[in-house]
């Protein structure tokens, strides 16, 4: 268990050892590169009494607080360190209904990790105390759409209950510092979802509801959690009218609770499904339980729903139900969302009822006159998704929230963003389409897989998991996704050093690669990333079945391509993997050939950005150089050219000098060559341990590029982001403990802006660190709060 040092997390940490006179201290600020959204929103909650206090929980990017004045979401936990990256996912958010300043986050991404914790705040998430949790959490596991698992007792602010995935129900009496197992709760759930929500009845001291993702999973305690009994009358079988006769039936023997809301008049509304979600759900239901009269009603919006006309019955299972919210001022007004309604998420519906579920309006059908044609969301083709001021957002898709302060306002969190409407009730009552806009500004929840910063054109081009990639023509505004071909994961990018408008990208998708379509996994742009031409054929080891399209390098003139099926080599399970080195193409991807002299699909391959046809690789202890466009390589044992014994590393090239290369060799430091690798010198002091290295524009008065490193600069020292202006001799820390983002997966200097480095994270998108020009000699760090 590694925990954060809270004092250090919020104090300015001071500048670190290995400072050299040549390396100026600057004040840095950190801002998100705007993509906006991009990941799964697992929870949207609003405080019942404090206006505009809202939180959005995410599966791998932790939790954000809404700031109404700034009109954006503010990330709350960017202090999470690389060692604690598992804590950068929110299993559940809870606030104290009596004291709005108190916030609780249950943090932990994966059950397999033994690092989970409670982040406890007295100031709405500005600062936290952190306590280890005695059970694992899984914010990025199945069932992440359900919940909230964590709840504060409205009759005793120090007491919380938490429904866990694998360890039963737990109670804390000291504000989440220590926890006890509520062993009286039935141990009926041999799955990894467990008890997905806990709800206190705010009118009855001692009455608590808990829902387990299992048939018959609704429980109640009326004695403060001492004893628990199943709620009688709950559904224990599927209502036959919901089940399609001619397709596969439900996966569970009875509906399984997903979410519940207790209305102001004491009606417990519950959404159900036949699987935990967020994917793989076929059937679902919605029930209400009147806690006063103890009566149940099946209020499922079903396929005989007739509003709005003309309603087309579905020919496939309805999917489940998950998202649920009830108006604060009217117990009979509620919204629910379907989940995974086949044939795809694009046609999931939002249903609105004004009469406690007796009848429903399918708001999505209202919004989607051309739903069969557009393939979009909420009536908007993806290209029409906009912020409330009309700025286009590239992404579109749950959870739901009816604003407690204005029931007209509904927010809907999807796998990719938050949609919002300000007129759901009034528009729906007229049977007209409510307008929807994206309200995810400030939320950056992507996983960065590739970045380049060419010397001309857009300063940054990116590749992401799940959402292809972007040419960031403006770093502060969301940009359109790369045009066709669309990649589910964009794995590799490169630019031609002397023709910077020539860009290449490779990524995964499941499209067929035929002579007519060309290769859908690789594309070339001649205009800096605006327009793309697919390769004629694919690298022979890669096709639509591969989940990783490897890495690609483009020579300085943009005429020679080298494409490595990196993951095939890394997985080591492909008999062809060692028969060829990275394939080369001299005809812009029409044909690919196997090289000589290098016989492994190594990912560690880089082009020289000045000299044409020149590629480098450092693989399995051997330095490889090709000067003929990747056709042939000359390999030299590293120990013969003054390199230490090392498995390999990705060469990092100086974009202004041919033959100048750096190798980040972990605890063996940084090595440098200025003669294409004929000889090497170690440029870093003892204790400089890079795990990531990049170069950017030289410091004023310097010829060598500025070096950026993620790692340490003294033995066992603080892991952080460092810059060296004097070619690795001395280093200054750029980030502080408040800006760690769970550790980057990659970093990229900017060849045009001295001091700037892009930080590619695994759940917080891309952050850019910039010198604050007006404060550039004072030292210290200005906390960034994310772009839009
Ligand atoms: C919103 O942000 C502004 C500017 O940073 C700050 O002054 C204000 O306190 C914030 N409001 C809330 C509710 O956090
Ligand atoms: C709630 O019930 C508990 C247990 O019976 C009792 O100790 C406590 O005083 C009650 N709190 C309030 C606010 O009624
Ligand atoms: C907690 O109690 C439950 C019984 O409700 C039991 O099944 C479970 O093993 C206990 N968990 C731990 C970690 O002790
Ligand atoms: C089953 O669903 C139908 C259609 O919604 C409804 O009329 C009926 O009352 C439900 N049956 C039960 C037992 O809830
Ligand atoms: C199931 O039956 C319905 C109604 O008869 C029909 O429209 C639909 O195409 C059938 N679905 C499948 C998958 O066969
Ligand atoms: C729209 O809103 C975004 C985010 O608040 C802002 O960055 C952008 O400048 C606005 N655009 C216009 C045209 O007002
Ligand atoms: C895809 O490539 C793999 C080898 O990497 C091969 O086994 C498989 O048959 C190929 N599939 C298709 C559809 O070409
Ligand atoms: C590099 O450029 C030189 C001079 O134009 C040319 O002779 C040579 O063939 C080029 N090399 C490659 C690999 O394209
Ligand atoms: C590639 O470099 C990484 C370090 O960045 C190293 O761990 C790995 O072993 C290298 N792979 C090969 C095949 O050399
Ligand atoms: C490099 O040379 C050293 C010393 O001769 C030897 O032990 C090592 O196996 C060689 N490595 C490779 C990859 O040939
Ligand atoms: C670094 O930590 C390791 C493992 O704890 C220890 O063996 C080593 O002596 C430390 N080195 C220094 C220079 O403190
Ligand atoms: C810092 O400020 C000085 C003068 O105030 C200026 O010459 C220099 O370029 C600035 N450096 C950066 C990185 O902004």
Image (cartoon, rainbow, N blue to C red):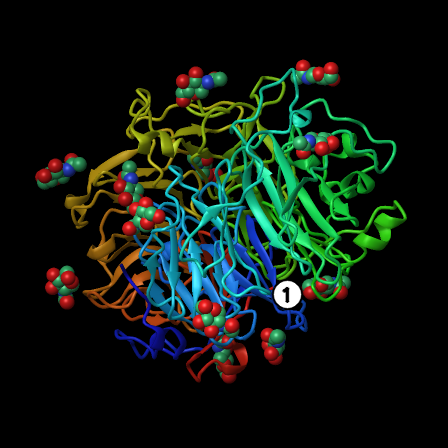
- Residue at coordinates 74% horizontally, 29% vertically from top-left? 303
Q: Is residue 523 above or below residue 11?
A: above
Q: Looking at the picture, does residue 383 appear above or below residue 634?
A: below
Would residue 692 appear left or right of 505 to someone viewing this image? Answer: left
126 above or below 626?
A: below
Relative side of 334 to 194, left or right:
right
Rendered location of residue 586, percent (x, y) = 48, 29
Q: Quadrant of residue 344?
A: top right
Whether residue 676 can be seen here: no
Horizontal arrangement in the rendering, residue 312 relative to residue 68 (left or right): right
Disc 1 C-beta below 8 A from ligand 6 = yes
Residue closest to the eye, 238 or 572: 238
Q: Position of residue 617 (x, y in %)?
A: 32, 40
User: 671 or 505: nearer the eye?
Assistant: 505
Image quarter (top left, top right, bottom left or bottom right) of the C terminus: bottom right
Which residue: 42% across, 45% down? 611
Counting every numbered tag in the picture gives 1
Whether residue 572 appears in this view of the structure is yes
Q: Which quadrant of the figure contains the N terminus?
A: bottom left
> What is the x, y in percent for residue 234?
57, 40
Residue at the bottom extreme? Answer: 778
- At x 62% / y 48%, what residue is drawn? 294
Identify which residue, 592 or 711, lies in the foreground. 711
Which residue has dot 1 on it?
A: 72
């Amino acid at each position: 268990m590694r925990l954060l040092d809270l004092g250090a997390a919020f104090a300015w940490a001071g500048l670190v050892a290995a400072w050299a006179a040549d390396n100026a201290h600057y004040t840095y600020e950190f801002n998100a590169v705007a993509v906006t959204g991009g990941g799964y929103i697992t929870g949207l909650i609003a405080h019942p009494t404090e206006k505009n206090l809202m939180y959005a929980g995410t599966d791998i990017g932790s939790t954000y607080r809404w700031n109404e004045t700034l009109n954006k979401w503010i990330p709350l936990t960017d202090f999470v360190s690389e060692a604690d990256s598992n804590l950068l996912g929110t299993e559940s958010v809870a606030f104290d209904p009596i004291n709005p300043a108190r916030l609780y986050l249950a943090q932990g991404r994966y059950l397999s990790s033994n690092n989970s914790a409670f982040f406890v705040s007295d100031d709405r998430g500005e600062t936290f105390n952190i306590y280890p949790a005695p059970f694992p959490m899984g914010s990025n596991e199945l069932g992440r759409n359900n919940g909230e698992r964590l709840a504060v007792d409205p009759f005793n602010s120090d007491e919380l209950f938490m429904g866990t995935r694998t360890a039963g129900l737990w109670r804390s009496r000291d504000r989440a510092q220590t926890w006890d197992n509520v062993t009286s709760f039935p141990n009926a759930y041999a799955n990894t979802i467990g008890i997905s929500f806990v709800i206190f009845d705010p009118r009855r001291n001692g009455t608590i509801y808990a829902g387990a993702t299992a048939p018959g999973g609704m429980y109640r305690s009326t004695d403060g959690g001492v004893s628990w009994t199943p709620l009688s009358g709950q559904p224990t079988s599927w209502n036959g009218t919901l089940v399609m006769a001619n397709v596969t039936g439900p996966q569970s023997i009875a509906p399984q609770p997903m979410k519940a809301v207790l209305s102001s008049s004491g009606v417990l509304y519950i959404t159900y499904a036949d699987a935990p979600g967020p994917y793989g759900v076929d059937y679902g239901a919605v029930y209400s339980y009147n806690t006063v009269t103890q009566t149940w009603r099946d209020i499922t919006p079903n396929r005989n729903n007739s509003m709005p006309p003309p309603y087309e019955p579905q020919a496939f299972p309805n999917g489940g139900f998950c998202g649920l919210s009830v108006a604060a001022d009217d117990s009979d007004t509620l919204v629910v969302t379907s989940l995974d309604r086949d044939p795809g998420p694009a046609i999931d519906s939002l249903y609105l009822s004004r009469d406690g579920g007796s009848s429903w309006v399918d708001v999505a059908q209202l919004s989607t006159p051309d739903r069969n044609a557009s393939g979009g969301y909420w009536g908007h083709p993806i290209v029409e998704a906009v912020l409330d001021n009309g700025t286009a957002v590239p992404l579109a898709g749950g959870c739901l929230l009816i604003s407690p302060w204005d029931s007209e306002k509904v927010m809907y969190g999807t796998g990719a963003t938050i949609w919002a409407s300000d007129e759901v009730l009034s528009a729906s009552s007229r049977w007209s389409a409510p307008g929807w806009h994206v309200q995810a500004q400030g939320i950056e929840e992507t996983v960065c897989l590739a970045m380049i910063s060419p010397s001309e054109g857009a300063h940054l081009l990116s590749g992401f998991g799940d959402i292809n990639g972007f040419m960031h023509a403006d770093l502060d505004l969301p940009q359109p996704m790369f045009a066709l071909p669309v990649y589910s994961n964009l794995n590799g990018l490169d630019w031609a050093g002397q023709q910077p408008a020539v860009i290449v990208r490779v990524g995964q998708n499941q499209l067929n690669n035929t002579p007519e379509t060309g290769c859908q996994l690789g594309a070339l742009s001649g205009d800096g990333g605006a327009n793309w031409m697919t390769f004629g054929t694919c690298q022979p080891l890669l096709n639509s079945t591969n989940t990783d399209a490897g890495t690609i390098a483009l020579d300085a003139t943009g005429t020679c391509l080298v494409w490595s099926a990196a993951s095939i080599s890394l997985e080591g399970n492909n008999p062809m993997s060692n028969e060829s080195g990275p394939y080369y193409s001299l005809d812009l991807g029409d044909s690919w050939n196997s090289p000589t002299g290098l016989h492994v699909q190594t990912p560690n391959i880089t082009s020289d950005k000045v000299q044409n046809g020149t590629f480098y690789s450092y693989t399995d202890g051997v330095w490889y150089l090709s000067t003929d466009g990747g056709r042939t390589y000359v390999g030299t044992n590293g120990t013969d050219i003054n390199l230490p014994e090392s498995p390999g590393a990705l060469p990092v090239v100086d974009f202004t000098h041919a033959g100048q290369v750096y190798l980040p060799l972990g605890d063996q430091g940084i090595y440098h060559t200025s003669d294409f690798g004929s000889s090497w010198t170690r440029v870093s002091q003892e204790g400089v341990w890079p795990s990531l290295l990049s170069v950017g524009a030289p410091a004023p008065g310097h010829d060598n590029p500025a070096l950026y490193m993620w790692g340490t600069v003294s033995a066992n020292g603080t892991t952080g982001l460092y810059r060296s202006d004097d070619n690795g001799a001395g280093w200054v820390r750029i980030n502080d403990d408040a800006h760690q983002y769970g550790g980057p997966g990659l970093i990229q200097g900017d060849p045009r802006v001295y001091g700037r480095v892009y930080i590619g994270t695994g759940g917080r998108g891309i952050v850019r660190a910039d010198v604050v020009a007006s404060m550039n000699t004072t030292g210290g760090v200005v906390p960034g709060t994310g772009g839009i």
